[in-house]
Image (cartoon, coloured by chain):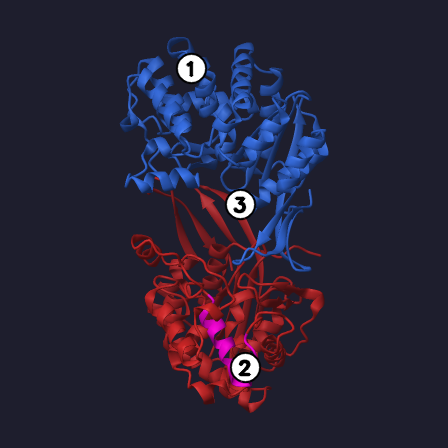
Chain colours: A red, B blue
């Protein structure tokens, strides 16, 4: 297998220090490859980059009709959030309407990603709960599916639980590929993650963005989720995060989501294109540089959008005393 | 340029998630290549992996005769330490004998790498000082050179300061290659770092381990530094660190040092071999997996040494709830 191309690098002084290889695909809803680099047929774990796909059963199983998820709750279902108050409260609010509590979340607890939120917890001597887990919105959404289906919620993270079967079927429906146990792992938040070709995830986002090639109900559900996420970018990540700032700058045109280990997926909604990108070595900052380079090329950014993307296309590297000694930069 | 080979990978469930490429060279003091992978002529920044080389001017400039550095202080000069009490106190002790203080360190302050040390500082509401900087031993050693030379210490981190000229000359002498401004950057602790071929660093460690091909005084100095580091592995890194535990297990046979951005350098002293390894993407855990795989192959480990190396050759990956969901593993 040929190596994927170097799509980002770090420079220290006047010499390249690190190389980051990767692949990306930009695809339309007919499956036409608009742009690509590297091996786009290799199966990759999409991780959290496809939370919007994993949220589709909220509509397929009519949980939305029963619990009337707010736009904010739908955005949070698509999120890897930073554990700020608004994220925690939004997740807690949906759980409460479901007649459930934090004790029903099976994602585990971790410290808030956001520094200020972490320090605020420390200041009062509090431990983080599962509500602070960046996936608590996705999990609350999955719990709403279980409750709507009238089935026990316990064990909803398991691959054989009906909720995960619904999630898997929804992802398969939009990406147009079967997901198999032969390429399956467990995500950080304990739900299954299935590997599939990079190209297929781009294709799935294009179909979600356009509604083309998928059942009308799926298309409607996808539009509601993308509308929610792009209307509430702060809920999808948090203060200062690339996804939040980039989606804010694109003002609804762009659905963008990071996944662990250097995955970036999304859709340029007005063009009807989906994209998927994976940094081979899992480096998040490098994948953000690659993403910014890609969006600069294909997303027709205006000047303000270009300025935001530049923050990730070229990221300064500072030493302990704060001097700028190098940079991470896109070669995409 | 061909891509370097994949020397480590992460697996999630039953599918490979990340690839880590790299290169390594194992060289004897005559320059014979004992083993290698990838492009060993490409210049890499060695970063902290060559602190033992950078400590050579302590002897070349006779600072040792004036200040009688202890074995512990010499080990700390070769260290990227964890900011535990013993590290901080050892650095402070040398500074005091020099008639200097923490205010003379120009490495900058950062939180201790060691969790318990970091929490202990927080518990008393104290800020970390430059003594907690992982490089404070190296910097104290460099200050001893300046004082022994009778020159102002201020600005000793600058490329044009006499101390850094001495450091540069010492590194050039052992690696047998010129260091050039054309491949130069600033390290995290503000001193210059020069890129040179990976092979040359391995060669330098072989010459330091054997004294062959270098001036007798350099050979003596190198032996004192390697003896110090291998006698006090805890001072070279800290509690639980790979370098500390691996050097302890090898009981003097092995000099091992990590550098930032996935560099690993050292010497198998009884064989007279030096080695240098760089993970292309800068991932430290991957470089440790590569290192462990390399040492398992070339260092003739006994059963106990093998058991320690295995901890880094295959590193479990756990999810938020603590379940083992994958692994980082060497392919070296």
**Near-viewer residue (B260 or A96):** A96
Residue A126 figure quarter: bottom left
Q: Residue B28's spot in the image, x, y percent?
A: 67, 24
Same chain, marks 1 and 3? yes
In the image, which is nearer the foreground, mark 1 or mark 3? 1
Name the disc covering residue B69, or none: 1
Residue A243 figure quarter: bottom left
Quickly name the residue at label 2. Answer: A57
In the image, which is nearer the foreground, mark 2 or mark 1? 2
Query: Which residue shows up at 57% across the image and 73% down it?
Result: A156
Whether B207 is drawn above or below A31: the answer is above
In the image, which is nearer the foreground, mark 2 or mark 3? 2
User: Quick one: SS at disc 2?
Assistant: helix
Query: Distance of mark 1 from mark 3, alpha carbons?
Result: 33 Å
Whether A153 is drawn above or below B201: the answer is below
Whether A73 is drawn above or below A306: the answer is below
Residue A112 figure quarter: bottom left
Q: Is-magenta flag for residue B15?
A: no
Q: Is-magenta flag for residue A149?
A: yes
Residue A38 seen in the current view: yes
Marked residue chain, label 2: A
Marked residue chain, label 1: B
Marked residue chain, label 3: B
Query: Distance of mark 2 from mark 1, alpha carbons?
Result: 68 Å
Q: State which region is magenta.
A: A135-153
Q: Earlier in the sequence, mark 1 or mark 3?
A: 1
Query: Which residue shows up at 44% across the image and 38% down it?
Result: B114
Query: Which residue shows up at 35% across the image and 61% down it?
Result: A240
Same chain, marks 2 and 3? no
Q: Residues within 10 Å of mark 1 (few under 14, many from 20)?
A: some
Name the disc covering residue B258, or none: none
Q: Residue A23's spot in the image, x, y percent?
A: 59, 62
């Amino acid at each position: 297998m040929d190596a994927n191309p170097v799509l980002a690098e770090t420079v220290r002084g006047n010499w390249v220090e690190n190389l980051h290889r990767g692949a990306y695909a930009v695809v339309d809803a007919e499956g036409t490859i608009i742009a690509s680099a590297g091996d786009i047929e290799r199966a990759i774990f999409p991780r959290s980059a496809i939370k919007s796909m994993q949220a589709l059963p909220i509509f397929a199983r009519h949980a939305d009709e029963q619990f009337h998820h707010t736009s904010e709750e739908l955005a949070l279902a698509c999120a890897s959030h930073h554990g700020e108050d608004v994220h925690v409260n939004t997740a807690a609010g949906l759980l409460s309407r479901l007649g459930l509590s934090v004790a029903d979340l099976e994602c585990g607890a971790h410290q808030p990603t956001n520094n200020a939120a972490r320090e605020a917890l420390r200041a009062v001597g509090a431990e983080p709960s599962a509500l602070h887990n960046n996936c608590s919105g996705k999990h609350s959404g999955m719990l709403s599916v279980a409750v709507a289906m009238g089935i026990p919620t316990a064990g909803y993270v398991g691959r054989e639980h009906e909720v995960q079967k619904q999630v898997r079927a929804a992802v398969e429906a939009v990406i147009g590929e079967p997901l198999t146990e032969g390429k399956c792992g467990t995500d950080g938040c304990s739900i299954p993650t299935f590997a599939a070709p990079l190209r297929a995830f781009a294709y799935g986002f294009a179909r979600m963005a356009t509604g083309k090639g998928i059942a009308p109900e799926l298309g409607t559900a996808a539009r509601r989720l993308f509308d929610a996420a792009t209307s509430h970018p702060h809920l999808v990540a948090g203060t200062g995060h690339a996804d939040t700032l980039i989606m804010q700058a694109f003002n609804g045109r762009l659905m963008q989501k990071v996944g662990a280990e250097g995955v970036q997926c999304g859709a340029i909604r007005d063009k009807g294109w989906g994209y998927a990108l994976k940094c081979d070595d899992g480096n998040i900052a490098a994948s953000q540089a690659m993403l910014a380079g890609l969006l600069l090329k294909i997303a027709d950014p205006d000047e303000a959008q270009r300025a935001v993307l530049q923050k990730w296309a070229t990221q300064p590297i500072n030493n302990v005393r704060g001097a700028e000694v190098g940079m991470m930069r896109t070669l995409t």
